Amino acid sequence: MTEATILIVDDESAIRDMVAVALEVAGYTCLQADNARSAHALIIDESPDLVLLDWMMPETSGLELLRRLRREELTAKLPVIMLTAKAEEDNMIQGLDSGADDYMHKPFSPRELIARIKSTLRRQGSETQEEPIQVDGLLFDPISHHVSIHGQALSLGPTEFRLLSFFLSHQERVYSRDQILDHVWGGNVYMDERTVDVHIRRLRKALSIAGHQRFVQTVRGTGYRFSQKLPAD
């Protein structure tokens, strides 16, 4: 079995080396970069399966690199886990809003990091729905990874794509944040439930063409559902 290749991006060599040793023991192949420019070149040339990206780096920050990756078609769906000393909730939300698949605070344990890598890669490789689904002008095609509303293509991050896939496959049912985490994130016990709210907000923004964000409904005190019916007041 061929193990995944992980790119470690951090300006501190001691952290890169520590992470690389842990990942190589776990069977992963590692690449390293100490700045955003080198990291981007390696991503294009080597096509890693996942990037561990430090937030705070000189010149170009990890957050700026992440935003660039999400803008470019070739790297838009590349899994990225942010590594950062920033522990504030606003920073976590900013990282997730910019397209990070996961977010880890320094210092972290190698075991937890490996668990999150496995979970992220497992989510990336799983496709549960094969047939296209259409809802009031919304077309979701999991095979071509294409989503459109009335013919206008939507730009969805990998997490929003999986979230929409789950909702479309389970319409009219209410799910708690914990249940959504389990289904969409693969039962990652380390993930904060607030992550669901961040990605729900991003999904609604993407669906706002012709008011389709109304289908993703908040059920107060319970969670969320995807419904074509108007919510009861």
Image (spheres, rainbow, N blue to C red):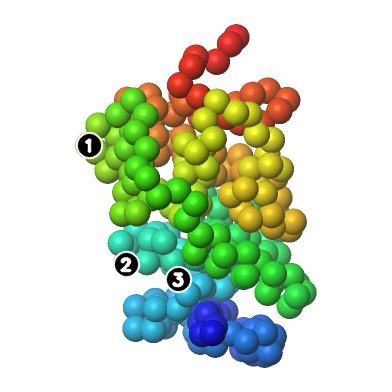
The quadrant holding residue 172 is: top right
Residue for point 55% across, 53% down: 96
Identify whether 30 is placed above or below 128.
below
Q: Nearer the viewer, mark 2 or mark 3?
A: 2
Taking the image as shown, residue 70 lies to the left or right of residue 151, namely: right
Q: Which class describes the residues within 10 Å of circle 1: few (<14), some (14-19), or many (20+)? A: few
Residue 106 visible? The answer is no
Q: Give the x, y percent position of residue 101.
A: 55, 59
Q: Residue at x 69, y 35 (%)?
A: 176
Judging by the rendered image, the residue that carries numbered circle 2 is: 74
Q: CA distance from mark 2 to mark 3?
A: 20 Å
Nearest the eye: 154 or 108 = 154
Question: Which residue is under mark 3?
Answer: 60
- Of the image marks 1 and 2, the number of the one nearer the N terminus: 2
| Crowd band around label 2 with a 10 angstrom C-alpha radius: few (<14), some (14–19), many (20+) | few
Residue bearing mark 1: 151
Q: Residue furthest left?
A: 151
